[in-house]
Image (cartoon, rainbow, N blue to C red):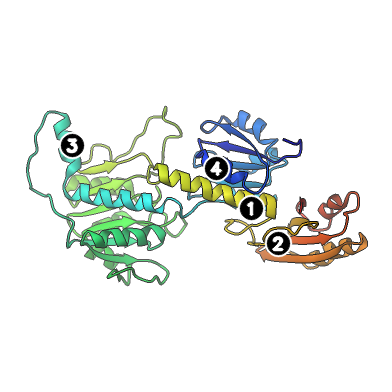
Amino acid sequence: MKADTPRALLLENVHPDADGALQALGPIAVNRLAGSPERALLEREIKSADVLGIRSRTQVDAGLLDAANQLQAVGCFCIGTNQVDLTAAAQRGVPVFNAPFANTRSVAELTMASIVMLMRRIPEKMFSIADGGWLKTADGANEVRKKKLGIVGYGNIGAQLSVLASAFGMHVHFFDIEPKLAHGNARAMDSLEALLAECDVVTLHVPSTPRTKNLITRKRIAAMKPGAYLINQARGDLVDVDALADALRSGHLAGAAVDVFPVEPKSKDEAFSSPLQGCPNVILTPHIGGSTAEAQQAIGLDAATKLAKYLFEGATSFAVNFPQVEPGPIEAGQARIVVPHENRPGFLKRLNDLADRGGLNVAAQYLKTEGDLGYAVTDLEGPLPDGFIEHVGALDGAIRARLIAG
């Protein structure tokens, strides 16, 4: 490949199909490192990377971004972006992309399976038989049919779960802070408290935000229907796990399934500890909601495609920290200049004046601002004067400038 071929650094065993998606619009040299590398190694490797692909373990903070002096974009090959300092990335002109919808089916299936397993009291029977016991009893075991399922957060995962649960014959209730169209016969609840008091199973499908942190408190667990089940396969900071453990041991709740925790091991070599260990009728899984071959492939394709479109077209649609622009492919013979800049008056005029002085015709232009950040995409006709892109990057307010040739 040419010396100026963009370089991608992919970590944490991102799905191999990501390589092809990254290279779909042009050549990219892909370098892979298994797992999440130690900081010193990561800082060395990232210096030559134009794009960085991570999953949930690698922390991208302001210091790492400063070490990555040619980094153009970050791809989170997962749903969450909490592992990236989004503000610091935006301030350096680095958009961050993720794949928020690619694993929704896998998570919904895990939740539905957990509901069936809990209501049949399978965890207790599995632990017993492993120790030589034989709990062949119907006591406390129930079908899910005709039971009331409460879904907190009726987004992509919650809505898919709603369809699956309805097919099992459950009566679906949901609560969301935004008005949502119900699927099938699902029923919207007026408040979280009403849902907690009504439903036999409550499952959480909301993001981690200041509003949702510790959403399920000791008080709200106490307000749940006696003998109900709680499932959290969304984010680890949504539930007071000490209160949940107490409710399980006291018998107020009949069971729980938890896939995410306030503190999780950073690797397989680090021990896991939780007050939920040893509780009766509990399914504890190691953050595997999206850990299926199908989900990881879909995530790899989704996030990598967004990175490729940014590198070769300047597209920022679906970036989580950037104004969103979708300029489309570049016309042959044109040059595209992409410029993240400070959102202050006059920048576009300064950019166009520079093009005019260089004898360049503006064939198309796109501008979007969001908060303190602006993003300008300009397609130019005519040979670029020597040093033109450097002059663009030196404009008052410009954060950085990049040339994409047509």
Tell me the quarter of the picture where residue 167 sits: bottom left
- Mark in front: 3 vs 1: 1
Q: Which residue is mark 2?
A: 374
Answer above or below: position of 66 versus 323: above
The local secondary structure at tag 3 comes to helix
Residue 309: which disc? 1
C-alpha span from label 3 to label 4:
38 Å
Which residue is at 87% across, 54% downward? Answer: 384
N-terminal of the pair, mark 2 or mark 4, is 4
CA neighbours of label 1 inside 10 A, class few (<14), some (14 to 19), many (20+): many
Q: Is residue 92 left or right of residue 351?
A: left
* Amino acid type, callout 4: Ala
Q: Which mark is residue 126?
A: 3
Spatial distance from mark 1 to mark 2, Cα to Cα?
19 Å
The numbered disc on residue 157 is none
Q: Between residues 189 and 313, which one lies in front from this camera angle? A: 313
Up the image or down, 227 lies above or below 283; here it is below
Q: CA distance from mark 2 to mark 4?
A: 29 Å
Judging by the rendered image, the residue that carries numbered circle 4 is: 18
Instruction: Measuring from the top left, give residue 197's x and y in whole percent.
Output: 23, 64
The amino acid type, in three-letter code, at marker 1 is Lys
Helix, strand or loop at disc 4? helix
Q: Position of residue 61 (x, y in %)?
A: 60, 43
Amino acid type, residue under disc 3 in the picture:
Met
Q: Disc 1 and disc 4: Cα gap in Å?
A: 13 Å
- Mark 2, Cα crowd under 10 Å, few <14 / some 14-19 / many 20+, is many
- Tag 2: amino acid: Gly
Q: Nearer the viewer, mark 2 or mark 4?
A: 4
Depth order, front residue of 2/14: 2
